[in-house]
Image: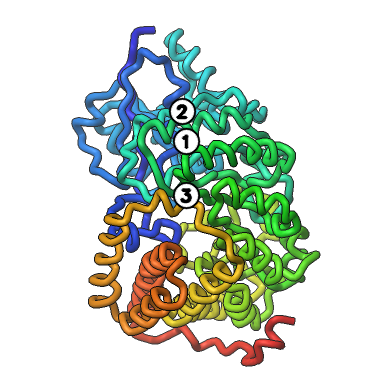
Amino acid sequence: MSPKKILFVHPEHHTSYWGFQYSLPLFGKKAMHPPLGLVTVAAMLPRNWDIRLVDMNIEALSDADILWSDMVFTGGMTSQAVSLLDLLDRCKRLERPTVVGGPFGSGHPARLGDKPTHLVLDEAEITLPRFLADLEQGTPKPIYRSETKPDVTTTPLPRFDLLKLGKYGIMDIQFSRGCPFNCEFCDIITLYGRVPRTKSADQTLAELQALYDLGYRGPLFLVDDNFIGNKKAVRLLLEKMIPWMKEREYPFYVTTEASLNLADDGDLLESMRLAGFKRVFLGIETPSKESLKETQKLQNMRRDMVDSVHDILDHNIEVMAGFIVGFDNDLEDIFERQIEFITKAEIPWAMTGVLAAIPNTQLWTRLEKEGRLLGYHSGDQFGRTNFVTKMDPDKLMHGFQQILERVYAPQAYFDRVRAVIERLDRAGHPNLHLKQVNPLQLALVTLIAIVVQGILSSYRAVWWRFIFWLATQHPSKYVAGIMNSIVGHHFIKYTAELLDNERAQRGGRVVVGEYKGPASAAAAMK
């Protein structure tokens, strides 16, 4: 087959809590995450093919870019669906064939209609070689699927060289796929299975080295579905990762996702700390044991979840977490209970959403059998969910909005950051990354924060009190404090924008706060 010109296009994400769109400019960045899936697929193509990448989150895609190519490869998540569909229409108009993969295509192929030329779905290690073989014979099929899960030790080193590294807030790598748990609402076990599959430790170190050799320094996200799903493999990785990081003076500070039972393993937490882990995302979901049982998140039931969060913090690893309202067993006090839990657990980055049914999940199947499905979810965080809820839908939306308004009120947010800083300081662990902090860059970021948060923002008085407290009481944690401060700007501004829009759509009627939950924190936490 003659060499081809392939254009990879990463569709645009809509603004969301996860996008950090209002904080990134303060760091001088354009987008939070790079398209790891696309650069991994790029590494599977023949080496003599001419490959380019356009990430629409950091730069515009021109018609000339599309017309240069013989074929456009793309894909993405639900948050990119609108941009993805527009891109496919554009490529069709310009008469360029398209190849679509990724989580959205694999989970929602019917929603793409006849827009893609080819669907190469599920895990590319299996389906892409089949497509390429047929393409070489001149007989490519419209769709390729596989129920087989690949051995990820065969996954090639991603083409990090295609990325504009300095434009992103964080770099991504992947160590494992799959999760051993069985949460009803989650599609990970459908997409990637319940048996975690891991790369080798050497394979992962090679990816770290590749980023290091390209000159990248800074935040790194291990985008595993559950980093500790295979603890034996994780320990082998950390054994090699610790000396690698020490020898290079900790060029990366690492974030990952894990289940809450991470808190039970102090030795593993200490190894993660020594390997440069600074933050972990936990799926806490709800303080309601009835709702945890309903959604089959049993791993969170056999513990005091607040204590578990604090155990992780005491190892100098900050916690961010996901929360959900709208379970069948949620009572009308759930909104107050969520707020009280987030406050007591000291979690600044609390990603809260209304339960939605995703295709190919156990939740979708159950609701379909019960006749409660209302179609696909729109992806609009403030829109109605896509099934008939047990709770009155107005009360559900009002309570959800109340959580956001109170959790991301400026004083409440900075109070949680203060609590985390104090706990980190009490733990007494040294900052392993201090040698990688560029004093000039830190000064510039601080100056920008002074202008944006300390002068122009509506919460400037709260910000100045926090910065004065940080600089005088906890100077050794200044980097963690200023970073949480800047990220908080996104949460505060985005929340205010969403709530203002919601009020405007309802003719000026203020809906947030109409729901009154229990006043007693003690009652709420029972």
Write the residue at 53% across / 67% down: 350
**238 over 497 or under it: above or below:** above
496 with respect to 368 (left or right): left
Lower position in the chain sequence, tag 3 or tag 2: 2
Q: Position of residue 511 (x, y in %)?
A: 45, 84
Q: Residue beneath label 1, please?
A: 37
Q: Secondary structure at mark 1?
A: helix
- Seen as rendered, the residue at the extreme bottom is 519
Residue 508 is labelled as: none
- Seen as rendered, the residue at the extreme right is 302
Q: Position of residue 288 (x, y in %)?
A: 71, 73
Q: Position of residue 409 (x, y in %)?
A: 43, 80
Q: Position of residue 363 (x, y in %)?
A: 67, 55
Residue at mark 1 to residue at mark 3: CA–CA distance: 15 Å
Question: Is any part of residue 359 visible from this angle?
Answer: yes
Between tags 1 and 3, which lies in front? Answer: 1
Q: Amino acid at mark 3?
A: Thr
Question: Is any part of residue 88 visible from this angle?
Answer: no
Q: Residue beneath label 2, please?
A: 41
Write the residue at 72% across / 43% down: 231
Q: Residue beneath label 3, please?
A: 78
Q: Secondary structure at mark 3?
A: helix
